[in-house]
Amino acid sequence: MVARNPWRAGDAQACSDHLQWRQREGPFISFFTSWNAALRRQHWLINNGAREVIIVAVWLDGLLLVYDARRIARDLNLGNLHWFQNEVLVHGGIPADSYRILAIFHCNGDIKDAALHLDGLNTEVRIPEGYIDGVSIKGNIGGKPNITELLRDELYTRTGTRDDAKFIPLVLCMANLTYDWKVDDSAGPMILLSFGPLRGIGWCFPN
């Protein structure tokens, strides 16, 4: 994923153009750090005439040149700062060989309840219906289709590894939970849950 003009300087004018949706090619790609915010944006896009909407889950942790959109909007005195909540700007784009894309969700405007499972945790999530249309789902949790293996297999297809260090944050982000990741040699990974926005996962809408 590459910005429309990745070589343009990321100065105040470029930030202003991007955040105010001016039709000027710029160096940024917007990512949401909240799954619910991404779902709201896909709903808005479809209601405003988009025929096909794709949400891409990307691993942002450790990526350079990532900026807080709300802080930039505040510094530029743009007002209505809530519009930029849970949004970050990535300068340049995501290298194709970085294996940072975790999953891709095709959206048709309808949202469906589903379930995801981690050891010791079952959680309900909302997903675009297009993600499971025509897909055979094995099992249910609490009457909701269990998409755990579907999502895990897709992450493997995209990244080439079965990496819990990325899969667990992806699941928790979709459930709107944060976590602390701790490794115990005797007990394996330990998940400590708390509420709030999760860092590390970004959701974008490629042009």
Image (cartoon, rainbow, N blue to C red):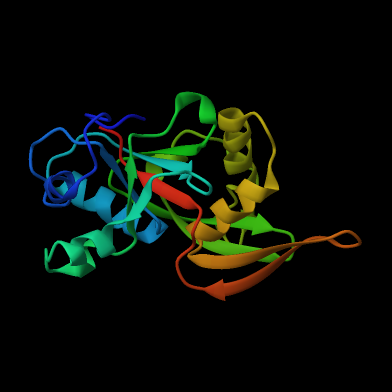
Relative to 45, does residue 188 appear above or below in the rendering? below
Viewer-side residue, 141 vs 131: 131
Relative to 140, does residue 100 appear above or below in the rendering? above
Q: Residue at x 64, y 28 (%)?
A: 160
Tell me if residue 142 can be seen: no
Tell me if residue 170 can be seen: yes
Residue 39, image quadrant:
bottom left
Q: Residue at x 57, y 75 (%)?
A: 194
Residue 159, image quadrant:
top right
Residue 72 in the image, given as x and y percentages of width and height: 24, 59
Viewer-side residue, 195 vs 50: 195
Q: Residue at x 73, y 66 (%)?
A: 120
Residue 8 in the image, given as x and y percentages of width and height: 21, 33
Query: Which image quadrant: the C terminus?
Result: top left
Query: Which image quadrant: the N terminus?
Result: top left
Relative horizontal placement of residue 62, taking residue 50 as reference (left or right): right
Residue 185, image quadrant:
bottom right
Residue extending furthest toward the top: 97
Residue 121 in the image, given as x and y percentages of width and height: 67, 65
Residue extending furthest toward the left: 23
Viewer-side residue, 60 vs 143: 60
